[in-house]
Image: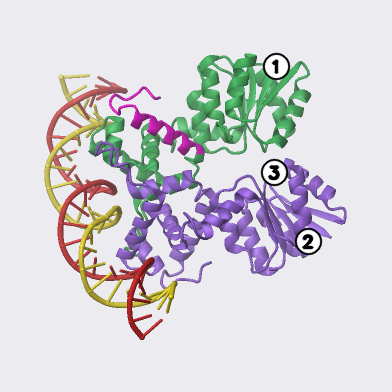
Chain colours: A green, B purple, C yellow, D red
Amino acid sequence: MEILIVEDDPLHRSYLHDAVRAALPECDMVVEAENGRAGERLAREYRAAHIVMDLQMNERNGIEAARTIWKERPDTRILFWSNYADEAYVRGVSRIVPEGAAYGYVLKSASDDRLRLALRSIFIEAQCVIDREVRGLQQKSMGSIKGFTDAEYEILIDIALGLTDRTIARRRNLSLRSVQNRLQQLYEKLDVYQNPGDDDEGRYNLRARAVTVALLRKLINYSALEKAEHDLSLWLGGSNGPASGEN
Amino acid sequence: MEILIVEDDPLHRSYLHDAVRAALPECDMVVEAENGRAGERLAREYRAAHIVMDLQMNERNGIEAARTIWKERPDTRILFWSNYADEAYVRGVSRIVPEGAAYGYVLKSASDDRLRLALRSIFIEAQCVIDREVRGLQQKSMGSIKGFTDAEYEILIDIALGLTDRTIARRRNLSLRSVQNRLQQLYEKLDVYQNPGDDDEGRYNLRARAVTVALLRKLINYSALEKAEHDLSLWLGGSNGPASGEN
DNA sequence: GTTAGTCTTGCGGGAACCCGCAAATTTTAC
DNA sequence: GTAAAATTTGCGGGTTCCCGCAAGACTAAC
């Protein structure tokens, strides 16, 4: 069995290496990559079926890398090992995991034991392992309570990018008013309206405020913005006519 | 000689510990803290004169911690050891370093040797050591070329927080029009105006766009926002009349 | 089908934003 | 000192944003 490690921090990389060796004696080869781009390349080169990698890397972040890897081999098993449980990451991951694929999401703060267990569960048993805290977010983001709709998340991204209502309307194929409706909906969910009990003042610019609140709540983060910016430039460049099937 | 290490990642902490032991044989005691708050407490407890710490920690980030530590003992020598060279961090640090204090700023990507040298320079020679890349940013942020004025940075923060023009005017003791002037100035420097050669469309909401561009350029980042949000709530709470001598 | 619910769209208006213009003020330079 | 440069402020208006109201459209359940 071979395992590919994708992690930019040398210390964490060697820690992971040791952990893999210890947890999986049946593993006879460990390959390391120090960023997403190298990770993709090595995954292709070695036909890697077992990968453990960080989200948040410089050259190419984990979500991007995982997406192309899974596009080429949907049965690859990937364990995400990340510092944070930002909703942006969790949403990003569960957006790209293929049907029926085995994957895991473990926080770096987890104990050695927890990591060991996750490694064995995924790579031996082909079983999904998702950290408790992450699990919580997943529930929220998907379904029932207090979660953000895809529509709401989408428009959040759009105003975070700094688009005007009109541009958003064009991009999402909506009328101007619909865009504004979604915005109001978003403002409500983010609870951006200042407590009117106060003075009439202390007012916020709702649009800008929404973005900040989302950032502070970790609904979006730097890499989500980075990706969104990239998608946007594609859309702008690509004869902004028919919506390219960006999912 | 005693040294206090403030770093939340256990791996990095123990690496630092080893590095300190190796670089400074004259050091006879190493104390560790796992976040900014604990760092402040231990610094007070041990009257620490030599500290090496991370920026970006959960409980209380490095800049906050350094500020209170330096407020109590301005001659404390602090080596900042950080992952990133965001302008937000660099600006934040150089904003709080006391007159004549010795400090350092080394990136985690630096070699063992570079770290060793920095440790000795600061704690033995009382000499400032700032990483090349960081140095570049510092120049820019301070002085001559392409840098952002304090005024510009200030208003950037304000719109990032989602304040209206009127609220900003009140907060900074300016007229409405002056605020808008500063905004235009900021838009210009951030180069937010879309290329007019294109279609008449693709237009941005300048205010929101400015914030995103600043984030992507790492002029501001999560912890800067967090601090700004905190300052804002102080100002809002504190009978938003006379500007409290913040900073 | 009908009924209720959500989503979309248009209209209209008040508020906020963006900004050119020009006068008043402060800062800087010599 | 005086001149030049940068900031601040007011006015005015074009644009965009925020949103209440109300009429279609589409879905879901019975």
Which amino acid lies under the numbered mark 1 shown in the image of this protein?
Glu
Which marked residue is nearer to the observer: mark 2 or mark 1?
A: 2
Q: Position of residue C28 (x, y in %)?
A: 44, 72
> Residue at point 29% right, 41% down?
B203
Up the image or down, A200 lies above or below A60; here it is below
Near mark 1 (Cα within 10 A), the count class, few <14, some 14-19 or many ≥20, is: some
Q: Position of residue B188 (x, y in %)?
A: 37, 52
> Residue at point 49% right, 31% down?
A91
- Tell if the residue under mark 1 belongs to the same chain as the one under mark 3: no
Which marked residue is nearer to the observer: mark 1 or mark 3?
A: 3
Q: Which mark is residue B182?
A: none
> Residue at point 30% right, 36% down?
A168
Q: Secondary structure at mark 1?
A: strand
Left or right of residue C11, residue A122 in this image: right
Quadrant position of residue A166:
top left
Q: Secondary structure at mark 3?
A: loop
Q: Quadrant of the C terminus of chain A?
A: top left
Q: Which residue is mark 1?
A: A2
Chain of residue at mark 2: B
> Residue at point 47% right, 37% down?
A226
Up the image or down, A167 lies above or below A117; here it is below
Quadrant position of residue B41:
bottom right
* N-term-proximal mark, 3 vs 2: 3
Q: Which residues are magenta?
A: A223-247
Q: Position of residue B122 (x, y in %)?
A: 75, 58
Q: Which residue is mark 2?
A: B125
Q: Which mark is residue B110?
A: 3
